[in-house]
Amino acid sequence: MTDLAALDSGSRPFTSKELGEMDLSIRNTNLPFDILETLEDLQAFQTKNAPPGLDSPYEKATLGLRDIAKTLAACGVFSEAGIVLRWLYFLDADILTDIETLQPPALLLVAYFAVILSSMEKTVWYLNGWGEAIIRQVDQLLEEDSKERSMFAWAKQQIPHKLP
């Protein structure tokens, strides 16, 4: 456990192995029904665009998002914000630098995080509007002709009633 374990006090974090052995249904959550498949697509996109031979911190971060979605499915109505927010704590320093310098791959990753964050708004009042604000900002920062733009379209579509 980490010093931030209190964020996750109501539901324990599962290991990737435990999550792989569970029969989970995304229908028990407010997540988009295709979140797991879309995260696989994101991982494939990142792998295709990563330098060869390196273990990508982006792959680890995307696997973390997948584990969050599965944990939310396992917890159902007992899901807490800490399940989602703890992902930020485990981000690799290289990704944090990329976020700070507004690198498109990092912005795309943050957009997918925002979709998951937004799914908690119905049950966690203090998260209201955060997902939308992040998506709006990423939309403004990504170049129209960037290769990440096509993958970003899915994230933007998840908040259609809020975004123009």
Image: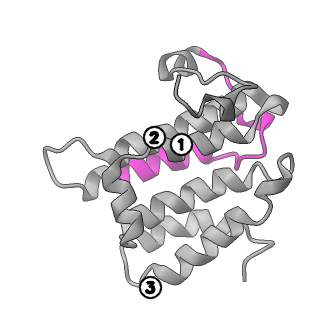
Type of amino acid at the residue the image marks with label 1 = Trp
Residue in the foreground of this view, choosing between 105 and 153: 105
Residue identifier under label 3:
144
Identify the image's colour scheme: rainbow, by chain, secondary structure or one colour. Answer: one colour
Front disc: 2 or 3: 2
Magenta extent: 22-46
Vertical arrangement, residue 36 with respect to residue 73, above or below: below
| CA neighbours of label 1 inside 10 A, class few (<14), some (14 to 19), many (20+) | some
Splitting the image into 4 quarters, where does residue 90 fall?
A: top left
Residue 35 belongs to the span the image colors magenta: yes
Discs 2, 3 touching: Cβ within 8 Å: no
Residue identifier under label 2:
90
Q: Answer yes or no: is residue 95 visible.
A: yes
Secondary structure, mark 3, is loop
Vertical arrangement, residue 104 with respect to residue 125, above or below: below
Splitting the image into 4 quarters, where does residue 29 fall?
A: top right
Q: Residue at x 57, y 54 (%)?
A: 113
In the image, residue 2 lies at what x, y percent?
Answer: 52, 28
Discs 1, 2 touching: Cβ within 8 Å: yes
Main SS class of the magenta portion in the image: helix
| CA neighbours of label 3 inside 10 A, class few (<14), some (14 to 19), many (20+) | few
| CA neighbours of label 2 inside 10 A, class few (<14), some (14 to 19), many (20+) | few
Q: How many marks?
A: 3
Q: Distance between the Cα atoms at labels 1 and 2?
A: 5 Å
Front disc: 1 or 3: 1
In the image, residue 152 lies at what x, y percent?
Answer: 51, 67
Type of amino acid at the residue the image marks with label 3 = Glu
Mark found first going from the N terminus, 2 or 3: 2
Q: Distance between the Cα atoms at labels 2 and 3?
A: 30 Å
Type of amino acid at the residue the image marks with label 2 = Phe
Q: Residue at x 67, y 72 (%)?
A: 133
